[in-house]
Image (tube, rainbow, N blue to C red):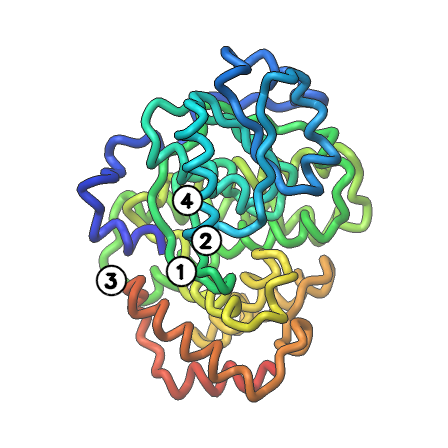
Amino acid sequence: MKYFHLKNISLTHNIENYNISPGKIIKGSGVIQEANNAITDPSKSILIADRYIMKQYGNLISSRQVKSVIFKGEVCPSEIYRIKKIISENGIKEVISMGGGKAMDIAKLAKRDIGGIKLTLIPTSCATCAAYTAVSVIYNEDHSYMDTVDVPTADNLFIDYEIFGRLPSGFYAAGIADTLAKYYETAAYRKYTKVQTLDDNMVFETAKSIYKRLKEIIIKKWAKLDGPLKRELTDINIIYSGIVSTMGKYSVTSSIAHAISYAMTIIPETREFLHGEHVAMGLMIEETAVKNEKNLWEIETFFEIIDLPKRWQSFRIKKNQLKDIFGFYIKIRDKEKIHIPIKDDLMYNIFSKLI
C-alpha cells in the first residue's frame, strides 16, 4: 500500500528528503552495548520502550543520564503527541527506541515531526520489518488501523542476536508471513497489470529470491530452528524484508493481504495477535480471490508447518463479525487505491467460507 499513498505526498513531509534505509546497521551478539557508544550526549537523550521491554532490557542502556519513557503500546494520535511533547519540552536530541514494530514506528514519527533528532532503533521482535522501513502505521485511539505514512528511517539500527535467540518460534513464523506476503502480493498485482516498470520487476525478482530461501527453510529446516537459523531469519524478516519494501518505493509491496490484515484490527479479539499472523489470514483470502490454486496450496502447506492461522476461528472471530471486517477492508482498499478487479460479492463470499 506504500506505493499508492505516495500518489498524494504531503508537501510538509516530502518523502524525497528522507533516506529510504537506515544510515547504519550494527548486528551481532551483544551489540546493544555498542548502542551506548552511539549516544553522544546522554543528558539530551531518551530511551523509549514499553514497560515489559524496559524491565527486560532497559538496563543495557547503562547511562543514568538517559531519560526513560514508557511507551503505552499504541501508535495513536494521543500517544504520538505525548511522546513528541516529552521530546520537545526536554530539549531531546537523541532518541533510542527499543521493542516491537509499534515502538519503532512511533519513534520514526517523532523524528519526522521534530527537527534535528538522531534516531537509534533496537528491535526486540523479528515479526515485522518496521525497524528498517521508511513508513509508520498509525492506529485510532480504539486500536483500529488509521493510516500508513512516510517517515524517515533510523540513523542507527542495532540487531542484537542474543535478544532474538530467546524469542519463541511464533515470532519468526509471523515475520515469515509478512515477508512472504511481499512476494505473493507483488505477484498478484503483476497478474492484473499489463505494463511492468523496471521498479516492478526488481522488486518482484528480489522478493522471489527471498521467497525461495524461506521455502527451503520452512520445508527442510523448520523442525530444527537453531541459533544460526534464527539469526538468518532475523536478517530476512527485518533487513531483507525491509529492503524489498524500500525498493518498492514506487512499486507495490503491499496489497490485498495487508489491507485485510489492517481491517482485522476493527475487531478487539484480533489485537492480541501479531501483525504477521493477521497477514497470514489476508494471504489465504487474497490467493483464493485471485484463483491461484498453486500458491494457495503452497501457503496452506507453509502455514501448517510453521503453525500460522488459516481460518477466522483461529482469531476467535464469529461469522456475524465478518461484515465489520469486510466493510473496513473496502474502506482501506478504496483509500489505498488497491485496484485488483475482484467483485465485492465474490470477496465477501470468500471471507465467509474461511470461517
In the rendered structure, which disc, 3 or 1, sits on the residue that comes first in sequence?
Answer: 1
Q: Which amino acid type is shown beneath numbered disc 2?
A: Cys
Q: Is residue 75 above or below residue 297?
A: above
Real-space Cα separation, disc 4 to disc 2, in angstroms: 9 Å
Q: Secondary structure at mark 4?
A: helix
Q: Quick check: marks 3 and 4 in contact, CB under 8 Å? A: no
- Single out the mark in the foreground, 2 or 3: 2
In which quadrant is the C terminus drawn? Answer: bottom right
Report x, y in % for residue 119: 46, 26
Residue that numbered label 4 is attached to: 81
Q: Residue at x 60, y 63 (%)?
A: 271
In the rendered structure, which disc, 1 or 2, sits on the residue that comes first in sequence?
Answer: 2
Q: Secondary structure at mark 3?
A: loop
Report x, y in % for residue 191: 35, 65
Question: Which numbered tag is attached to residue 146?
Answer: 1
- Single out the mark in the foreground, 4 or 1: 4
Q: Which amino acid type is shown beneath numbered disc 1?
A: Met
Question: Which numbered tag is attached to residue 76?
Answer: 2
In the rendered structure, which disc, 4 or 2, sits on the residue that comes first in sequence?
Answer: 2
